[in-house]
Image: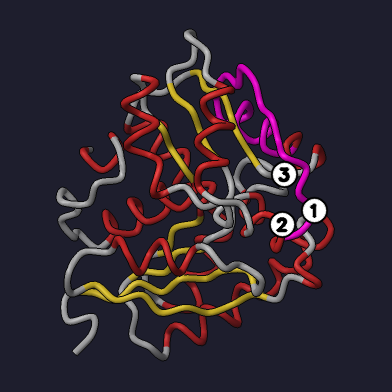
Amino acid sequence: MYGWRNRIGLVVTSSDRTSEGEYFRHTPDGVSVHVARMLLEDGVADAETLERMSADVERCAKLLKTTDVDVIAYSCTTGSLLKGEGFETEIERRIETVAGVPAVATAASIKRALDALDVESLTVATPYIPELNELEVDFLEDSGYEVLDIYGLGCRTDEEICAHHPEMAYRQAREMNREDADAIFISCTGYRTFEIIDRLERDLDKPVITSNQATLWDALRKIDVDYSEIELGTLFRH
């Protein structure tokens, strides 16, 4: 039986083609992943469309509840921070109320990951348009972190974001590196990163946090599953 240890429910945007693949390939033995999709109209990655999408959270939680999952991960970075600091935990509470199991939302997971690694200052690499970059900076700084620099690729749709190979994330993050940054954060659950996290950390000699990495780590912690054999950077050694 799949999921004989635990089952993770994963809530993704309807146009996301990255999160499932990264989760499926990196969950521990005996942990299964079950997916529900929120409608992101035309796959457009802007604040207005993401806000409308957030109304779909409860429906997805109801669907995943029928799969008897042990935790639900809301896999969307800007979709869980677009209304500012505190919205990420509101998303978690909404899911928990409907599904009756613990929930993690990507923006909250990122904060927990930064805190676990004692990160105070960071640079941020994203595939986003300027509007979403501004929302992310506001969220991180309101949460107490110093954002030294942020740069986005200007992608307006999930299709554009998911089309990028992980080598693009590697090059972008490396260009964003600063000596005074405690860590580098690569944002967006649609931006493929798992293949390059360890290499990037070795090359830059500092922690690298990515959206899917932080969310998966947080979900596994919630259900007390040993993740020590997963090779996804410094975070998975905490």
Provide the residue designation for mark 2: 160
User: In the rendering, at what x and y percent does residue 40 appear?
Assistant: 73, 70
Provide the residue designation for mark 3: 128
Under tag 1, what secondary structure?
Answer: loop
**Amino acid carrying mark 1 in the image:** Arg
Q: Is residue 106 left or right of residue 235?
A: right
Q: Please state which of residues 26 and 103 is positioned toward the viewer in this rendering.
A: 26
**Labels 1, 2: front one:** 2
How far apart marks 1 and 3 lie (CA) works out to 7 Å
The answer to which image quadrant residue 66 occupies is bottom left
Q: Which mark is residue 156?
A: 1
Q: Which mark is residue 41?
A: none
Q: Please state which of residues 146 and 92 is positioned toward the viewer in this rendering.
A: 146
- Residue at 84 percent across and 58 percent down: it is 48
User: In the rendering, at what x and y percent does residue 102 appear?
Assistant: 37, 65
Question: In this picture, is 104 found above or below 176?
Answer: below
Q: Is residue 167 left or right of residue 77?
A: left
User: In the rendering, at what x and y percent does residue 88 appear?
Assistant: 57, 51
- Residue at 41 percent across and 23 percent down: it is 119
Q: Is residue 197 left or right of residue 78?
A: left
Q: Are marks 1 and 2 in contact (CB under 8 Å)?
A: yes
- Residue at 35 percent across and 69 percent down: it is 24
